[in-house]
Image: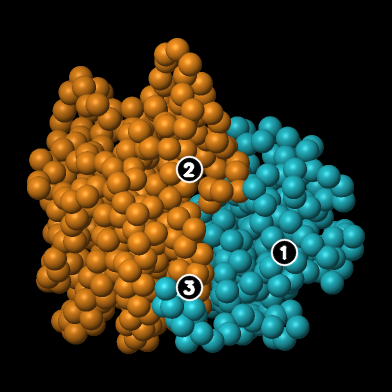
Amino acid sequence: MNSNQIITGFFKKGNDYFCIRDDHRSFEPCLIEEIKNLDYFHALEKEYKHNATGENVFKFNYGPSTGGMVETVDFKIYTYGERILSVDIFPEFKRREIKITREKLDNALLKMERLNGFHSFSYSTLLCSSLERLLGIGIPDDVRIKRILLMETERIISHIFKTARLCEAASQNIASYQLMALREKMMRSVAEITGHRYMFGINKIGGLYRDFESSRLVQMAREAVREYSQIRDGLYFSRIFIDRIENTCKISVPFSRGPTMRASGYAYDYRKMDPYYADLDFSIVTENGGDSLARFQVFAGEIETSLEIMEKAIEQKKGGDFMPELVENEIFGVETPSGDARMFLEMEDNRISNIYLRTPSMLNLEAFARGICGNVKTDIPFAYESFGIWIGELGELL
Amino acid sequence: MKFWPINSLRKGILTTKFPGGKNETISPWSTLPVRKNDSEPYCPVNAINMGKVSLEKCISCGRCTDSMEPSLRPDNFEKFREKPLLKRSFKIFPIDSGTCGACNTELFSIGNPYYDATRLGIFFVNTPKQADALAIMGVYGEEMEPVIKKAMDVMAQPAVIILFGACALSGGIIGRGLRDLVDPDLIIGGCPPDPFVILNALEKVRGR
Ligand code: SF4
Ligand code: SF4
């Protein structure tokens, strides 16, 4: 299936509006009416209200701060009793305002890697590579390879975490513990190899602040993927697990992002457009179910693809500088572990003067809100975990 | 289904003996940096004063690496009051005021088999009413102020208030901290704090 080059973001520059489309590297002028007509327009404005009315409909509150969720988020669930009719989601309880414009570029980078600490390396690479291209700074090709290795490691860790949370919510406690232990083992190795468990402080505009041995990282990934495969096979044999996640939170909308979108059969992965991955052939993992089971299958498939990419990347010893050309009106992007983030940047006097960032969680939160309708309340935790949503990403970049 | 028990046995015992034994590992830059030479250090958040690093301000970025190096010590915390009545069981309710997500996942890490905080009587609970401690993380946010205050009001005494991570302590590089909103019994530094530092700090505030 093709995502039909749909609009996934928009921003204002002066008095004019511009939109971002899948498969397009440049932003395009558009009319605000066109954007407002999108049925997911409010998600691009970070609003998720779908209130339901009717006799005997009541509102059930879940959040904003509850031990069951990793982050602060408030749900108002409309129901007659058990089945969910619709849901309002309020992410603004923890909305952070992060000042990026007119900051020293290195400070902007430190802030960007803290937009979503869990996917910090993807976001820091997005900012570094965009600034490098705008400023005409070439990086040694070895740095490109090392950034790919860290981004793919981050994806493996993130997918393991999501699978573990999914197992925990579906009462598969042993599998969940084993996956959390595997993630911990990887975090310890990452800290040992790079100096920080979450890869903070490594990226630098024009290079890396801390160099590391690529082969150690790849060896760690090999062992982790081998261990993951055993646990995954155990889960495939667990009828209880499969029954619990099959058909829950079924969704098929081309505006959803990353593994969520690919689990509904849309073969879109920003890495196919990313100049970093130009010579690294890989197949996009898709499934057709659109449910939590399909998302789990995509995570499992993508963990293997990430290792394949890493193996190919360390074999590429081109040497020289890497500086892909800048296309006109370029809208930058990165495939984070939860889906593509797209960014518009403008500079003035060597500082960022204008920034717009559309993160995957902005759209995946809307996909979740739609998919959960018709499910029962107890489905919320594992349905939510299978979308890889991070509320931190909904912060405002100023 | 024999797969799970056999697979668990194959992995052996993973759990640390810490704090009984030494911590096996630590995230280097999450520990407080110390001087390695006399050169003037650079720090983007002015965390270094006369060669000493403020645990409240340090964002674990490693930008001072020309003059400083990670101490690798699991003591990046400060205890202002001790609550020995909580020696036996210690139930924690985490509150995310405005985080990047890493403080949240690092706090939950102490529940994984490598740390197994339950062996020390440390548990996570789903409401502040059941909790002995609030671990508040992230920067200040207007919408979260009443949520934090309400959580503190419903807790039984004795209760421990923990400010967790550089954002909560000073705002880090992101925003405003929470020091003027709450009077903490314990502060834990790092961006994010390392799980060994977290375990160490939680044990000390209970007087263990
Ligand atoms: S690690 Fe970063 S924040 Fe901490 S003292 Fe060094 S430069 Fe400052
Ligand atoms: S202290 Fe660091 S890790 Fe914790 S929320 Fe703030 S930026 Fe994230």
Give the Cα separation between the discs numbered 2 and 1: 26 Å
From the image, tell me which residue sits under label 1: B122
Left or right of A371 on screen, residue A166: right
Residue labelled with disc 2: A378
Q: Alpha carbon of mark 2 to alpha carbon of mark 3: how far?
A: 24 Å
- On the picture, is A279 further left or further right than A261? left
- SS at mark 3 in the image: helix
Residue A265, compared with residue B147, is above or below; it is below
Query: Which residue was labeled with disc 3?
Result: A178
Chain in cyan colour: B
Residue A377 badge: none
Q: Residue at x 46, y 26 (%)?
A: A79
> Which residue lies at the image location 22% right of the left edge and 74% below the top edge?
A309
Q: Is mark 3 within 8 Å of ligand 2?
A: no
Answer whether labels 2 and 3 touch (C-beta < 8 Å): no
Instruction: Give x and y (percent) for residue A86.
Output: 39, 28
C-alpha span from label 3 to label 1: 20 Å
Helix, strand or loop status at disc 2: helix
Which chain contains the residue that carries disc 2? A
Q: Can you tell which quarter of the image residue B45 is in?
A: bottom right
Chain A as rendered: colour: orange
The quadrant in which the C terminus of chain A is found is top left
